[in-house]
């Protein structure tokens, strides 16, 4: 089995050049680029943060975090589109 190709991070243009984000047309497409392990880490660390800082916290889950991130990305895309028109 070959190891995965590691692309150097140059800037966002490099991601477009290498075709990493070429199929991303909606916010959902961008957050699907993140691996399951990364989503689980985000959720775990979010829950730890709130345990340490807020006693009235109900743990979040991956699906909820994906929804929150998608909504933020959607709002960003809408704001960016509005500015360009």
Image (spheres, rainbow, N blue to C red):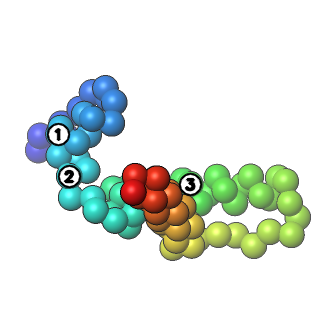
Q: CA distance from mark 2 to mark 3?
A: 25 Å
Q: Which residue is mark 3?
A: 42
Q: Is 7 situated left or right of 60 in this image?
A: left
Residue at (27%, 59%) from the top-left corner? 24
Give yes or no for contact between labels 3 and 1 (Cβ–Cβ under 8 Å).
no
Foreground mark, 2 or 3, reads: 2
Residue at (38%, 67%) from the top-left corner? 28
Tell me which corner region of the image, top left, top right, bottom left or bottom right, holds residue 12: top left
Give coordinates of residue 33: x percent, y percent: 33, 56
Where, quadrant-wise, is the C terminus in this rendering? bottom left
Q: Which residue is mark 2?
A: 22
Tell me which corner region of the image, top left, top right, bottom left or bottom right, holds residue 3: top left
- Which residue ends up furthest to the right in the rendered image? 55
Q: CA distance from mark 3 to mark 1?
A: 26 Å
Give coordinates of residue 35: x percent, y percent: 37, 56
Foreground mark, 3 or 1, reads: 1
Q: Which residue is mark 1?
A: 18
Sequence order check, earlier mark of 3 and 1: 1
Q: CA distance from mark 1 to mark 2?
A: 8 Å
Does residue 31 appear in the picture of this structure? no
Tell me the crowding category of disc 1: few under 14, some 14 to 19, or many 20 or more residues within 10 angstroms, Cα based: few
Residue at (18%, 38%) from the top-left corner? 17
Tell me the crowding category of disc 2: few under 14, some 14 to 19, or many 20 or more residues within 10 angstroms, Cα based: few
Q: Is 5 situated left or right of 42 in this image?
A: left
Q: Nearer the viewer, residue 9 or 56?
A: 9
């Amino acid at each position: 089995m070959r190891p995965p190709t590691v692309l150097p991070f140059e800037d966002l243009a490099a991601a477009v050049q290498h075709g990493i984000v070429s199929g991303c047309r909606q916010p959902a497409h961008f957050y699907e680029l993140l691996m399951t392990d990364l989503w689980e880490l985000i959720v775990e660390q979010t829950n730890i943060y709130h345990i340490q800082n807020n006693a009235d916290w109900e743990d979040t889950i991956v699906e909820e975090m994906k929804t929150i991130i998608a909504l933020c990305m959607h709002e960003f895309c809408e704001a960016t589109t509005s500015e360009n028109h």
